[in-house]
Image (spheres, grey):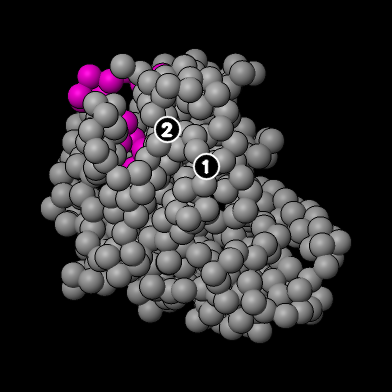
Amino acid sequence: MKVAFHTLGCKVNQYETQAIREDFENNGFFTVEEKEFADVYVINTCTVTNLADRKSRQYIRRMKRLNPDSIMVATGCYVQMSKDELKGISEIDLLIGNNLKSKIYEMTMDKLKEKDVNRVNVLTYDELKDYEDLGMVNSIEGRTRAYIKIQEGCNRFCSYCIIPYARGKVRSRDLDEIKKEAELLIDKGYKEIVLTGINTALYGRDIDLNIEDTIRAVCSIDGDFRVRLSSLEPTVVTKENINSLLKYDKLCHHLHLSLQSGSNNVLKNMNRKYTREEYLDIVKMLRSFDETYNITTDIIVGFPGETEEDFHDSMEIIEKALFGKVHGFKFSKRKGTKAALMNDVIDGKIKNDRIDRLFKLAKEKSEEFRRLNRDKVTTVLFEEKTKEGLMAGFTDNYIKVFTDHDEKLIGEFVKVKILDIYLDGCLVKIVGKG
């Protein structure tokens, strides 16, 4: 039988979809492309934005029209938060919330065999209390970078974010299981291990461990590979503990450190629990260790009550921090969050103007950061050949680089010299292997 998967949202969703896919394939299913005819469709939803919700509904209806006899399974955060809304979509055969994804194959088979199975399977927030073991993911699309989920849930409750309600309390994966999965993937030839979670830096808070314990365990594995952290936040990665992360040679010199706003007033209203000064202290410490340490970030513009002065504070931090990349977003309210009830809503035209100005400055500063890397000799893991015929990969500090070399470099660590900025990255010259 054929199964197709469609995933929206974060890297955790992508990891979980791969685990579900392997469950189906290990039981005889053949995976087809997400828009092809299939007997079963599994959509792993996201609910960060209204757009994500709409994309989920569109996919469900489109694929059910392609095969009306298929089993349509909807899972993930949109299901977790909006089961009553989704119950009204007749095309969905099974609604399966978070922390029940390990049961998707079993429930689907029961449905195919016309057994009596609940259409709606969603736990309450209080029931989202144990880490759900999806088994070891042992194959990832591509042959260079692999993600490992290390934790679930978030207890930060930022005023604009629905995810803590959708994912539940902080739950951490067993450290031995993380290390075993990393060993398995490294043995299969993966060269980069990315540690990810809903709030990665909160790993271990529930089991008397911390993120450094995970880094230490994975970095201790023998082999030619490197380790990268997914998105972190300044509430748990502080200047006091950043030094402990800098001592691991296999840990990449790149952090995606979410800022969200450069204004202390807005940060307070967002319930972010740090100040712009504390954020810049972390940046200063990282750059004192390595002036080309790459810091990427997220910034929201148009949060309720954001003044022009508040926005200026965000622009000023982009200037000072010299981010490698800024992911900018216009604020959109999510039902169920505190920010959705706030007054002083920012006009759409003002938000559009601010995001345009933010992107313009962010692009200039990204180019300035990349120019800072010129003439540096560094290590690149090449991943693909572009349609223009160039080899492309990423440096240790997460700069995308290009060279007119042959594709035998894919999956290999190569020494390069950075020549100049090019497109969204840099051109490089190969100077050696290793």
**How packed is label 1: few (under 14 Cα within 10 Å), some, or many (20 or more)?**
few
Is 64 rendered above or below residue 49?
Answer: above
Q: Is residue 320 left or right of residue 10?
A: right
Given residues 218 and 125, the one toward you in this image is 125
- The quadrant in which the N terminus is found is top left
Which of the 4 quarters of the picture holds residue 107? top left
Marks 1 & 2, CB-CB < 8 Å contact: no
User: Which region shows up in magenta?
Assistant: 15-32
Residue beneath the point at 50% across and 38% down: 90
In percent of width and height, residue 351 lies at: 79, 63
- The three-letter code of the residue at mark 1 reads Ile
Residue beneath the point at 46% across and 62% down: 163
Per the rendering, the mark at residue 375 is none
Is 15 rendered above or below residue 63?
Answer: below
In percent of width and height, residue 36 lies at: 49, 18
Dominant secondary structure, magenta: helix
Residue annotated with mark 2: 72
Residue annotated with mark 1: 89
